[in-house]
Image (tube, rainbow, N blue to C red):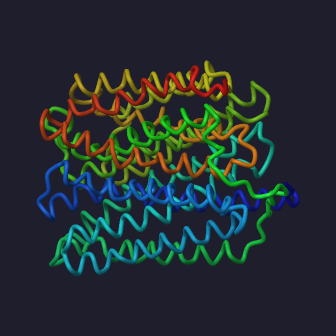
Amino acid sequence: MHSDTSKSSRFSLVLLTSLFFMWGFITVLNDILIPHLKAVFDLTYLEAMLVQFAFFSAYFVGGLIYFFISMFYGDPINKIGYKNGIIIGLLMSAFGTILFYPAAHYQFYGFFLAALFILGLGFAMLQIAANPYVAILGPESSASSRLNLSQGFNSFGTTIGPILGGYFIFEYFKNVDNGADSVVVPYLFLTLLLLLLAIAIKGAKLPRFVNAAQLIKGAGALKFRQLRLGAIAIFLYVGAEVAIGSFLISFLGLEKIAGFNEAQASPFVAFYWGGAMIGRFLGAISLSAIGKKKKYISMLLVSALSFAVVYIAVYLKTDVSFEQAFPYLVFLLLNYFAFIIGRSLPGRTLTIFALAPIALLFIGIFGSNLWAMWAILGIGIFNSIMWSNIFTMAIKGLGDYTSQGSSILVMFIVGGAIIPPIQGAVADFAGVQLSFFVPMLSYVYLAYYGWKGHLSN
């Protein structure tokens, strides 16, 4: 392989970071769509979770199609290039968002699910192309750091998404004649942004990585243990993260927790996804090559600054006091020390970060009021580095099978389609609070993958 100058690589990373931001922003809007469409179409929790099923099952279908193409015809990314793969993904995503217009016009829940499925197919292509591209834009030793940085801006999108999306859907457009119409203008605007981003990437000069070896057919990526177990880890991580995010508004609406209505609860979802943003920025610093003292000081400053951004954004919508947010600060401090204990080792850090949500879920399930509320919101802080650490450990050493391995990992994002409906069924049967036992099981496996599962033999 070869690349252009490091300056070109830095520009490419900036451009790709905007891409990560966009798909984070759009993905988290599902958390707003779920309670909104549940009310519009009078759905059960299980039926409402079909939003996540439609969206994330597309990752499995898209990844599976890519995998079979690579088996029989060779890896498509090695033929069309990462740049064209990203552009195809953006165009497919734009087609999915524009379908929200006819879906709202005909007031048909199934049409919304079809639009979300197509949107998910586009994002699957983006994941297959963009994640390994970021990983190879520099030395392998700093791949996790770069991916954490890009994922940090992905989380910035997921942080402001609930605030803006909740405002437009639950407040600004809430008085439209047809309740489903409140999503039309926001999603048409997103269509425009996706098309503009596709045009920008088309015109940009991105480093081209060429596989000099002959295209290899077959399912060779599956011979790597770290990839096979990593695929399960991706399934459980995404499923747990999405399930928790999907139930936040319902959880905060419980009288024993906060008793919020949808408009009051939606800004607080930003703390969950904002925690992931903070942790990913810290992860990028923690896994970088800078000196230890400078690293820890930088992490502390970035943590404080990022929290201030999230807090101010939520405060402007809710007037939440600094004293009320104190438990969240405690979890941020624990997160900081967890990074220090992890010693910049991706596997060790993953194990520590998987154990923390288990404790927080216990608090959320059996607690009440302030600490239970912030415990569930604080899980996002520890979800932060999971995707990037799992992904880079799973594809490490795959060589010519890297893109095929990436497609397999993207297939297993389908966990976001499977686990939320399971939690929905449990919530219908046992209540919202007890349903959080479902994602808890995922973190047990993630602790194992960070400890032993990522090893190649």
Q: In which quarter of the image is residue 272?
A: top left
The total of numbered circles placed on residues is 0
Give the answer, above or below, for where 413 lies relative to 118: above
Q: In this view, does 57 lie to the left or right of 79?
A: left
Residue ID at (40%, 41%): 241
Q: Splitting the image into 4 quarters, where does residue 117 fall?
A: bottom left
Residue at 49% in and 78% down = 192
Q: Residue placed at 54% from the left, 32% from the top?
A: 229
- What residue is at 67 percent from the left and 27 percent from the top? 456
Q: Position of residue 287 (x, y in %)?
A: 70, 33
Q: Can residue 415 be seen in this view?
A: yes
277 vs 179: above or below: above
- Specify whether residue 330 is in view: no
* Closest to the observer, 350 or 372: 350
Q: In this view, does 228 lie to the left or right of 356?
A: right
Quadrant of the rendered image containing residue 170: bottom left
Q: Nearer the viewer, residue 361 or 240?
A: 240
Q: In the picture, which quadrant includes the N terminus?
A: bottom right
| Quadrant placement of the C terminus | top right
Q: Tell me: 35 left or right of 429.
A: right
The percent position of residue 411, horizontal first and vertical second, equals: 49, 50
Q: Where is residue 341 in the image (x, y as percent from the top left)?
A: 61, 18
Residue 423 spot, x, y in % from top left: 25, 39
Residue 306, compared with residue 22, is above or below; it is: above
